[in-house]
Image: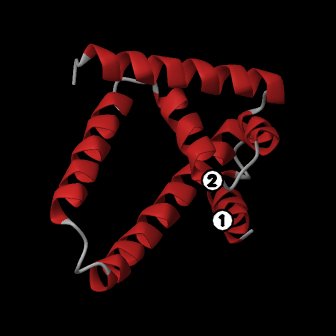
Amino acid sequence: MDIMQESFTRYLERYSKKTRNISLLYAIARNYFLDYKRKNKKEQIMEDDKDDCSTNQEHDLQVKQEYRKVLRAMKGLDDDERGILALVLDGELSYKEIASLVGTTEGNMKVKVHRARVKLKEILKSGDL
């Protein structure tokens, strides 16, 4: 709710007098959401570092390598595909909610997510990272 409120506030302060652009509002919300997730991720990592001193370092290294591999593969996706996958994988929004943000139907959103996942798998299999 805070993200939505902040997004509308930023939009209205900067752009409301000029135009009514829903995709601009979506972009502001998406960027604010990503900033919010990055900030919380850093805080979570700092907490995890304190708690996980005894974890297996080899396992951690493998996880980090896989994570980096997936991030490199995601760079091969279009911006829209990356954004949609990020929203879906976060798990906080339903397909219906994401579809309303993007301005499409729930069925179309599921198709887009499926195609983006297939494309990501193809990139990972091809090894062009």
Q: Position of residue 33 (x, y in %)?
A: 56, 58
Inspect the image, locate mark 1, and give the three-letter code of the amino acid beneath it.
Ile
Q: Secondary structure at mark 1?
A: helix
Residue under the image location 33 percent in, 29 percent down:
73
- Front residue of this view, candidates 56 and 33: 56
For the residue marked with disc 2, what is the amino acid? Ala
**Residue 103 point in image, percent of width and height:** 77, 32
- Earlier sequence position, callout 1 versus callout 2: 1
Rendered residue at 73%/67% (across/down)? 5
Residue 128 seen in render = yes
Image vertical order of residue 3 relative to residue 88, above or below: below
The residue identified by callout 2 is 29
Whether pointer 1 and pointer 2 mark residues with C-beta atoms closer than 8 Å, the reply is yes
Where is residue 98, by image quadrant?
top right
Q: Which residue is mark 1?
A: 3
Q: Is residue 30 left or right of residue 124?
A: right
Q: Quadrant of residue 100?
A: top right
How far apart are the alpha carbons under marks 1 and 2? 7 Å
Q: Residues within 10 Å of mark 2 (few under 14, many from 20)?
A: many
Quadrant location of the N terminus in the rendered image: bottom right
Q: Residues within 10 Å of mark 1 (few under 14, many from 20)?
A: some
Q: Is residue 19 left or right of residue 85?
A: right
The residue lying toward the viewer, choosing from 5 and 81, is 81
Q: Is residue 104 left or right of residue 36?
A: right
